[in-house]
Amino acid sequence: MTIPIKQLKNGYEMPVFGFGTWQIGGDTRRNPVNDDLGQTAALVRAIEAGVTHIDTAERYAAGHAEEIVAEAIKNFDRTKLFIVSKVWPDHLKYKDVLKSAMASLKRLKADYLDIYLIHMPNHAIPITETMKAMDKLKSEGLLKNIGVSNFSVASLQEAQSVSPNKIVVNQVHYNLIYREPERSGLLSFCQKNDIFLEAWRPVEKGMLAGGGIHLLDTLCRKYNKSPAQIAINWLIFQKNVVTLAKMVNEKHLAENLGSFDWEMEKEDIEKLRQDFPGQKSISGAVPLQ
Ligand SMILES: NC(=O)c1ccc[n+]([C@@H]2O[C@H](COP(=O)([O-])OP(=O)(O)OC[C@H]3O[C@@H](n4cnc5c(N)ncnc54)[C@H](OP(=O)(O)O)[C@@H]3O)[C@@H](O)[C@H]2O)c1
């Protein structure tokens, strides 16, 4: 299948859905007994099914997730893929950003990244320094675009104010439960300022994929879709919102890929926004900084 592409007003585009690699290859450390072959095969399966957007980070399994991605993408046309990596907040000094980017490219066996994200702010390091390094990497063609992650409106504005390059994406915790981007004004800021808000953890690690929530169950029946499909569809039909899930399990991949080619009525999208039970105003994992 073809994953739909979303476009900003400035022409910049990206796939509405990607494959996340947090907990591929390990946790924050490499897992010595990890099922590398199985996870590589899962990524290959996803690419063959039409997923071009793969999200990784130097932090994931201490770089090993990037190595698994490299193995998975090696027989595909790189120009048709959309590879994203991230620099960890300990590495936001000018020279460290350059070093991290080069190390990520080496592990990915890639010449460039489609987007390079600042994984989260580090207010102890001047953002001017970090953005200068990001700008240099872009000018050298090592990354096509610059993005951030877990940035509040204020941090995003500050980062943008010191770079001539547009920040095209802010990747944050957002789903039916976690509403910090709505309540903090970040979502409307991104919509007004032509920036993608990329929602990480769309199915809240499977929590949103089970039944038992009356509103979700009602909509599943109405649209003949599963809870995970409703949760993902709700995100991607919002202006400027894209998302990504980890889905090593073949069934999860197939299910999640059924989230795009149909639309909910506006009233149902709003009902989910207003009435979904147990909403939280702040991320339980990584709040905006
Ligand atoms: N920037 C950041 O700070 C940040 C933070 C967290 C995550 N992320 C990125 O966002 C990606 C997605 O977030 P996440 O991995 O934390 O959470 P997620 O995608 O919401 O959940 C992944 C978990 O849910 C399972 N799952 C996926 N689809 C399912 C379905 N349809 N039904 C039941 N279970 C399903 C997966 O199982 P299987 O894998 O076994 O299929 C996996 O255990 C990450 O992988 C990472 O790339 C970024």
Image (tube, rainbow, N blue to C red):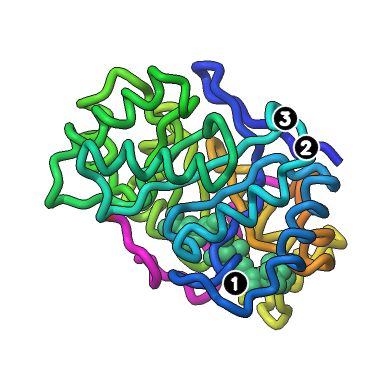
First in residue order: circle 3 vs circle 1: 3
Q: Which mark is residue 80?
A: 3
Q: Residue at x 49, y 25 (%)?
A: 144
Q: Which mark is residue 205?
A: 1
Report, in whole angstroms, how far the alpha carbon at label 2 lies from the one at label 3: 8 Å
**Front residue (pair 216, 76):** 76
Q: Is mark 1 within 8 Å of ligand 1?
A: yes
Looking at the rendered structure, the kind of residue marked 3 is Lys
Looking at the rendered structure, the kind of residue marked 1 is Lys
Q: Which mark is residue 44?
A: none
Looking at the rendered structure, the kind of residue marked 2 is Phe
Report, in whole angstroms, how far the alpha carbon at label 3 lies from the one at label 1: 28 Å
**Front residue (pair 215, 93):** 93
Residue beneath disc 2: 76
Q: Is mark 3 within 8 Å of ligand 1?
A: no
Q: Nearer the viewer, mark 1 or mark 2?
A: 2
First in residue order: circle 1 vs circle 2: 2
Q: Residue at x 37, y 42 (%)?
A: 148
Badge 2, how many Cα within 10 Å: few under 14, some, many 20+?
few
Q: Quadrant of residue 227?
A: bottom right
The stretch drawn in magenta includes residue 277: yes
**Front residue (pair 8, 168):** 168
What stretch of residues is rendered in magenta? 265-288
Q: Is residue 49 above or below residue 219?
A: above
Q: Is mark 2 within 8 Å of ligand 1?
A: no
